[in-house]
Image (cartoon, grey):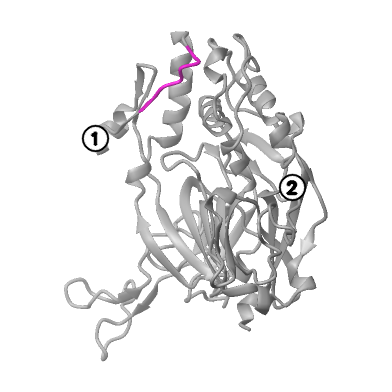
Amino acid sequence: MTQSRLQYKVLITPLIAKNTYGETLDITADIDISEFVSEKGIGKIKSQVDNGDYDFGIFSFTDITLNVINYSGKFNDESSSYSIFSFRRDLAKIKVQFTDSYNETTLMFEGIVNDEATRQDNNKGTVKFKVLSYSSIFNKTKIPAGIISNGTTLSAAIERILNLTDIKAILNFDPINLNVGYDTTIDDGSKFDNKKVKDAINQLLLASSSILYIDDSQNMIVTTRSEEGIVHNYFGGFDRFGRENILKINKFNNGLQRMFNAIDVNGVSIEDPISINRLGIRTKSLNFDFLTDSNKYQPIATRILDDFKFQRTEMEMEVRTKDAKNVSLLDLVTINYTAAYYPANDNEYLPLYGISKYGQDNYPLTINPLPIRSNELFKVIGIFEDPKSLKTVLKLRSSGKALEGGVETLPVYGQAVYGSSIYQAA
């Protein structure tokens, strides 16, 4: 049995009737996990922004693969008398918990079985479950005709959809958790009739400059994009206070692929001339068929343009899972990735300001020469956890904001900012 499998617990809650769940079964407590969870065990846990172009929309779009040994038949579907799934296997709830070296348990994943993608191998006696995040219920639910009428506000439409019976059987919703960034009325409510909830919610969230995420208590939270919230601090291998918790940084880029400086909404275009002059025009066209009043197009386009007219640095940062167990999508991160300097040649010293001479002395060589300011705030837009290696990759995008005061570090030549950084006593 590997160490990584010992630190994860899997819980299953089957349906016993439509929209009604039964007892939660702890398969790691009741059975030997080395017997029932196959060698590949829990697949990589992925959580990322659902929409590739925007961080508007449904968040926590997560999935895992769960491989279980099924010689007893207890993981068969509901047609088998041996099965633990008396009503149906589809939509059974799954929880995955992680226990660290201090014996502290953290909920790492919650979701529902997608039986369409579940595969059973009778020769090997295994079942491979595809488990999707709770938000995947939006993909399995349609909006009844007439729920959204003409004149309904965007916020009221979101509330009515999130209150649908099939969704509330899995998730919780309280109107106090609904706060949109922009509200207006819907001109043609029939466009939502029999529409898949996921498609409708994404359109409504985008039009209202809002986001939706699901917290650890299965509450659906609709809120505005914000650069406030929990801040996690990470440090590279040359931190002067020995706080190193970054394993490596990959895929560092300037974020141009996610930048748009011209937004077209239903044929009405809003542009940012300064960005276009510097980077060339990059247009994103959007269509909201439930809006027909042209006076509503410009406010929506303007809000989206304000968020995406500048390119923002993106990267992937690998850390140990124990150092990321409390990180959630949309949390904020600071990175102290200080460069290490050393002489260009073995027989030289580091050049000193006021002593070294231009044209004679050599510039120092650097390790970790990434242009990351220690007080720059990055937003978590993806989390990829590997239970086998106990490592987690955080996909980050600069928020365009700085942390007031930053994280304390020693001033470094070439990185310290005059007027912001503090001189250290000799």
Residue 329 visible in the shown view: no
**Quick one: 16 or 395, which is closer to the camera?**
16
The residue lying at 51 percent from left, 70 percent from top is 246
Magenta-drawn stretch, dominant element (helix, strand or loop): loop
Residue 157 horizontal/vertical position (percent) = 63, 21
Q: Residue furthest bottom?
A: 347
Q: Are marks 2 and 1 in contact (CB under 8 Å)?
A: no
Residue 358 visible in the shown view: yes
Q: Residue furthest right?
A: 23
Instruction: Please identify the quadrant where the N terminus is shown.
Output: bottom right
Residues drawn in magenta: 285-291
Q: Nearer the viewer, mark 2 or mark 1?
A: 2
The residue lying at 70 percent from left, 29 percent from top is 164
Q: Amino acid at mark 1?
A: Gly
Residue 112 horizontal/vertical position (percent) = 65, 50
Judge left or right: residue 341 versus residue 407: left
Judge left or right: residue 310 versus residue 177: left
Residue 55 horizontal/vertical position (percent) = 49, 40
Residue 288 horizontal/vertical position (percent) = 46, 20
Which labelled disc corresponds to residue 191? Answer: none
Sooner in the amino-acid sequence: mark 2 or mark 1: 2
Q: Which residue is mark 2?
A: 87
Q: Which residue is mark 1?
A: 280
Residue 289 magenta-highlighted: yes
Q: Amino acid at mark 2?
A: Phe
Instruction: Please identify the quadrant where the C terminus is shown.
Output: bottom right
Please tell me how crowded label 2 is: few (under 14), some (14-19), or many (20+) other residues with Cα within 10 Å. some
The correct choice, above or below, for 84 with respect to 291 in the image is: below
Residue 319 magenta-highlighted: no
Report the Cα–Cα distance between label 2 and label 1.
57 Å
The correct choice, above or below, for 10 with respect to 390 in the image is: above
